Amino acid sequence: MQNPLPPLGWLRTFEAAARHLSFTGAARDLNMTQSAVSQQIKALESHLGQPLFHRRPRALELTEAGITYLPVVREAFRTLIRGTRAVTGDHQNTVQVQCNITFAVNWLGPRLPRFRVQHPDVRLNIFTELWEPREMAEGAAVEIRYSLRPADTVRTELLTTDRYFPVCVPGYPVTLDNLHEQPLYDCSNLLSNWASWAEDVGLPWPNPPITYATTYMVGLSVAMAGGGLCMGHKVIVSRLMAEGRLTAPFDHSVQMPEAYYLLLSPQAEETPGAVAFANWVRAEIARVAG
């Protein structure tokens, strides 16, 4: 009798390709070539006897079979992860955390020594993303996501709303009148941007050239080097301002349409380390806000 189960590696490749809707994104996640990902997906489709993806010119789309199969595969992986942790015994102390790279470097990283003092037995594995992911990373228990509103596929709670405003090094020669002549930097595809801030403050905005990057870290680095101004998010730049590395040259700030959310996977509540980390994040956010 033929084994109806496909190889585990094919399923892992399918989940990654479905999460990114891209063979290239899956290849990057899995440290494979794009060609190898494509071949494994074709092999899985042949094994199942039906296609899982529509191959569009610039993107992938799940077929009806793919949409049906994906939650089954994901739940199977979650079951394997929980079972493996139960056997190895490290489920109490190892927590997979996912967040964007700017939050990880500027907010989470500087505070991790405090977490270690409070929870010396909990080990964190931190995964960073450039863009808002469609799903939590495979195996992640806790995610801190910057988003308009995450999909309710897992338990989601608002961590904090935020405000945004321009930042630069102290003493940088900028005024509202010459702002549009300065080198300006921002992260691409955000609603909390230069144009919306200028509109809120009532500035005529002659469409100045703005340098965009796929990570907020680029603009922050340039601003701290004295090379221009970037749009600052209060939760990210507060520490840098307190240290005197950045300043807000104008008083005006705007409420962000986006916010920071805490996402908890189904297995998080079964993992004491994940519960401890989530509670610590909530307390740290409340402490800063207070």
Image (cartoon, rainbow, N blue to C red):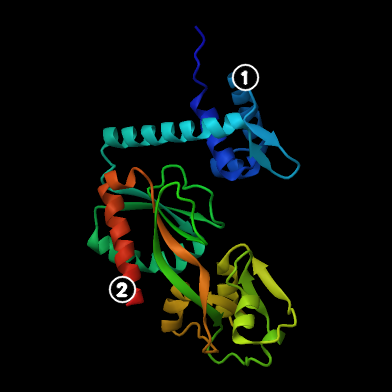
| Between 21 and 203, the one nearer to me in the picture | 203
Q: Secondary structure at mark 2?
A: helix
Q: Marks 2 and 1, Cα distance to the nearest angstrom?
A: 55 Å
N-terminal of the pair, mark 2 or mark 1, is 1
Where does residue 230 sit, x and y in percent of width and height?
Answer: 59, 77
Q: Secondary structure at mark 1?
A: loop
Where does residue 157 sit, x and y in percent of width and height?
Answer: 38, 58
Question: Can residue 243 be seen in this snapshot?
Answer: no
Task: Look at label 2 and name its amino acid.
Answer: Arg
Answer with left or right where residue 36 lies relative to residue 261.
right
In the rendered structure, find residue 153 and report the number of the disc placed on it. Answer: none
Q: Quadrant of residue 114?
A: bottom left
Residue identified by numbered label 1: 49
In this picture, is 138 found above or below 204?
A: above
Answer with left or right where residue 73 lies relative to residue 218.
left
The C terminus sits in image quarter: bottom left
Query: Residue at horizontal 66%, vertical 68%?
Result: 212
Query: Residue at horizontal 27%, vertical 55%?
Result: 276
In this picture, is 248 found above or below 155?
A: below
Which residue sits furthest top? 1
| Between 209 and 193, the one nearer to me in the picture | 193
Q: Quadrant of residue 130?
A: bottom right
Category of crowding for the residue at label 1, using alpha-carbon neighbours closer than 10 angstroms: few (below 14), some (14–19), many (at least 20): few
Task: Look at label 1 and name its amino acid.
Answer: Gly
The total of numbered circles placed on residues is 2
Category of crowding for the residue at label 2, using alpha-carbon neighbours closer than 10 angstroms: few (below 14), some (14–19), many (at least 20): few
Question: Can residue 208 be seen in this snapshot?
Answer: yes
Answer with left or right where residue 71 lies relative to residue 200.
left
Residue identified by numbered label 2: 287
Where does residue 141 sit, x and y in percent of width and height?
Answer: 37, 48
In this picture, is 189 found above or below 206?
A: above
